Image: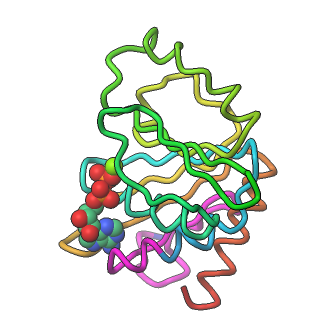
Amino acid sequence: MGAVYNSEAMPILDAHMLEFFSRSPEQTRRIGMRLGGSLKKGDVVCLQGELGAGKTTFVQGLAQGWGSLDSVSSPTFILVNQYRRADGEKLFHLDAYRLDSVPEAEELDLDSMLAEGALLIEWPERLGNLIPAENLWINLDHIADEHRQMNFKANGRRFDDLLDGVRHAMVGGA
Ligand SMILES: Nc1ncnc2c1ncn2[C@@H]1O[C@H](COP(=O)(O)OP(=O)(O)O)[C@@H](O)[C@H]1O
Ligand SMILES: [Mg+2]
């Protein structure tokens, strides 16, 4: 049979994946908040997408949901921002946009960050294989003015659980 355009013929994303269409920056922040509330020390969240795709907007919601005492800005000149929470937990926000090379990236000690907190990474593709194999990978695409497509992919059990939480939040009307 040829291509049949009904819902059953659409590609079925497996349990490790989730596709979401955001229609506003607020909605992107709200999804981030749901995920942020579940983030723990050692978790890795990668945000891939072109400039203006909404990575930092997502991080803003995420940090808020996590309970950050600090506000989020793009770590444009500093590579890594660190956010604090009342209970002393830490959240790291790395923006690899300005990294020139993988050797330069090797000076970033991701392991010691992960021993202390969760880690969010913008432009993760610039870090090559320094990125831990287990992570939640999110791709953001600019579709139109306020319309973004978000593709989530869980790599590892822990991140399947995190993704389930996001999925339920969406069903619950994020
Ligand atoms: N649905 C949406 N989700 C996220 N950002 C959006 C959306 N619609 C419009 N925007 C705007 O796009 C820009 C995204 O910027 P930013 O989050 O800094 O992107 P990045 O970090 O990927 O470069 C912001 O100005 C934001 O208000
Ligand atoms: Mg950014």
Vertical placement of residue 27 versus 17, above or below: below
Please state if 149 lies on the left or on the right of 80 as rendered. Answer: left
Q: Residue at x 49, y 68 (%)?
A: 61
Whether residue 148 is visible to the viewer of this picture, yes or no, is no
- Residue 96, quarter of picture: top left
Q: Is residue 101 left or right of residue 94?
A: left
Q: Quarter of the image containing the C terminus?
A: bottom right
User: Could you say where residue 126 lies in the image, as x and y percent from the top left?
Assistant: 41, 27
Q: How is the image coloured?
A: rainbow
Query: Of residues 93 and 49, which is closer to you in this image?
Result: 93
User: Which contiguous range is marked in magenta?
Assistant: 2-29
Q: Residue at x 46, y 84 (%)?
A: 6
For residue 45, above or below residue 21: above
Q: Is residue 105 above or below residue 83?
A: above
Q: Residue furthest left?
A: 145
Query: Which residue is depicted at the point 48% across and 41% down?
Result: 81
Q: Is residue 6 magenta?
A: yes
Quadrant in the picture for residue 16: bottom right
Q: Is residue 71 visible?
A: yes
Q: Position of residue 144 (x, y in %)?
A: 20, 71
Q: Which residue reaches farthest right?
A: 157
Residue 42 counted in the magenta span: no
Q: Nearer the viewer, residue 81 or 167?
A: 81
Residue most extreme to the bottom? 173
Residue 31 percent location from the top left of the image = 53, 73
Quarter containing ligand 1?
Answer: bottom left
